[in-house]
Amino acid sequence: MSQYFHSIRVDPEKCNGRMKCLRMCPTQAIRIRDGKAVIIEEKCIDCGECITVCPHNAIIPLTDPFGEASRFRHTVVMPSPALYAQFGREILPEKILSGIKKLGFDDAYDLAFTCGEVSFAVQEYLREYKGPKPLISNVCPTIVRLIQVKYPALIDQVIPIQTPRELAAREIKKEKSKSLGLREEDIGIFYLTPCPVKMISIKQPAEKGKSHIDGAIAISDFYGPLLSAMEDIEKTSYREALKSICILGIGWAMVGGICRTLRLKNALAVSGLGEVLKVFDDMERGKLKNIDFIEAYSCHQGCVGGSLTVENLYISYNKILKLIETLEFEQIKACPDIREVRKLYKEDYFSFEGKLEPRPLKPLDRDLTKAIKKRKEKEQIYESLPKIDCGVCGAPTCITFAEDVVKGDAEIGDCIFNLPQKFAELSGELSELLNKSVVVHSHKPRIDNPHNKKDE
Amino acid sequence: MSDENIFSQRFEIRGGDFSNAGKTSTSIKEILQEIGIDPSIIIRASIASYEAEMNVVMYAQRGALTLNITPERLLLRLEDEGPGIENVEMAMKEGFSTATEKMREMGFGAGMGLPNIKRNADDFKILSEPGKGTSLDIVIYLNSTG
């Protein structure tokens, strides 16, 4: 079994080596080998950029099929709050949750309330924290993996508080097993996910051994059936439908939601992996010491921009924003009791069930002197390359190609700019061979070789 | 263990070039990651080299930062051609700064640069000649924990 589980697979039947993913991958984790995309597991952070960009749908997110739930005696679906922004404005969370139950699940759980609890817990953590700043939200698993792989030095600044989905799953299992007299293993908890990375955070959590969630279903797979299931659900009054929505939690679907609902003044909200990289670079240089909190998402606009959502991400961002504004206007809060949260916080209810460890990329060599020697070789190889990042060798850039050569994963001759030279060498050897063997053979084999016309 | 240089690379820095500011410290970080230096050492080297680089960008005409590595330590040597520092003792105090209003508007010049470098270094030397320039030697031991 490989060391890292990934939620992304390449379908070799569909892939025709168009190289879009090769260029898009933010951690240079893709190579084209024999005309097909291959993912380097150590480097992949499951951001899903390749899924979005592939013109042939050849990169497949590994989520659970709909029917997976049948192996449990009791099933609960927890949708990401991003689901609430996938439909028309008149379809409110209450109706969506009823629709899920009509699809054959025993229960549907609104995560917004748990998000609200975690918001308060984050507030507590920020208040008590004395170490280096800023602290980073751990809600986006891609960001957590990015830090493990590319910014290991920032790992202690990731807030060690459980994500709402993990916390809710743990509590639902406890509660349901008691009330229904079932074993916790008989209760299946499924997360409706806006992105593939949540799937890995379930199969292989960054900070602990096992997730409390049993599977993840893509919002895009769920959308059609849910839409038809909601058709004949009676509409309740607007205020009635809104009254149980936690205003603190609903913002978790979009970038800036946590900062906004907690009214954090000295905080940054960043979305889009490229932007996050810039902010983390600055952070590593010690430039953001005066900022308290960073909310960072790999997808543009936050979870509403996930690659497994349906609605245009700017429209769904706007829908969440409008929902928050409506709740503010109607003065509906439906928030958890902060005193209760503080009490639970002191009892370590929200704490990580493990520790986040860095996962730095392998250096060129374990031995410092050898690593430095290899780095020099890499620089020399790079100098000999055309530096146009054409991608024909199968690596995204000339510098990554040079690295692959030094690591022994590619050969210098794979660069087409080295081809004429390689060809000349090869034809030289060949003609030498032919000259030797001409005595033995009765006829000369015909060779089409522009470099070696004298043999024709 | 020998204390012989096994790696040396020089980075030129231009004074006033704010759009490229930070590139040197990023390159240094990438080199250190690639050769397998411990993350806790990398972050100290990143911060120190960034502050040193910014001092050149903000105050000097030009400068160069050289990364030297021996099996035992990193040495970041900065040499610049600039105004130099009139009072080194003052400049080492937190909060002391000669930054212009414009630099402060950009978020620089909080007077934390040199003290921050010193805090992240195991050994730190500063030599400055007013009117000529400044040189810094920043040493971080590879087996230290900071």
Image (cartoon, coloured by chain):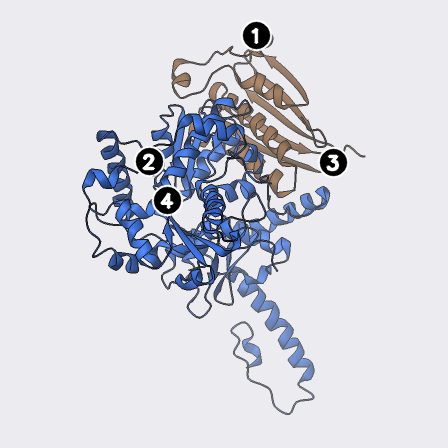
Q: Residue at x 52, y 54 (%)?
A: A185
Mark 4 residue crowding within 10 angstroms, few (<14) / some (14–19) / many (20+) = many
Q: In the image shown, does A40 or B123 lie closer to the viewer? A: A40
Q: Mark 2 lies on which chain?
A: A
In the rendering, which numbered label is found on residue B71? Answer: 3
Same chain letter for marks 1 and 4: no
Real-space CA distance between mark 2 and mark 4, rounded to the nearest whole angstrom: 18 Å
User: Helix, strand or loop at disc 2?
Assistant: loop
At label 4, the amino acid type is Cys
At label 2, the amino acid type is Cys
List the residue tagged with mark 4: A303
Q: In the image shown, does A165 or A296 lie closer to the viewer? A: A165
At label 3, the amino acid type is Pro
* Mark 2 or mark 4, earlier in chain: 2
| Residue A455 picture location, percent across and down | 58, 80
List the residue tagged with mark 1: B90
- Taking A259 as reference, is A359 above or below it? below
Residue A288 visible from this viewpoint? no
Q: Residue at x 25, y 59 (%)?
A: A228
> Mark 1 against mark 4, which lies toward the viewer?
4
At label 1, the amino acid type is Met
Give yes or no for contact between labels 1 and 2 (Cβ–Cβ under 8 Å).
no
> Mark 3 against mark 2, which lies toward the viewer?
2
User: Helix, strand or loop at disc 4?
Assistant: helix
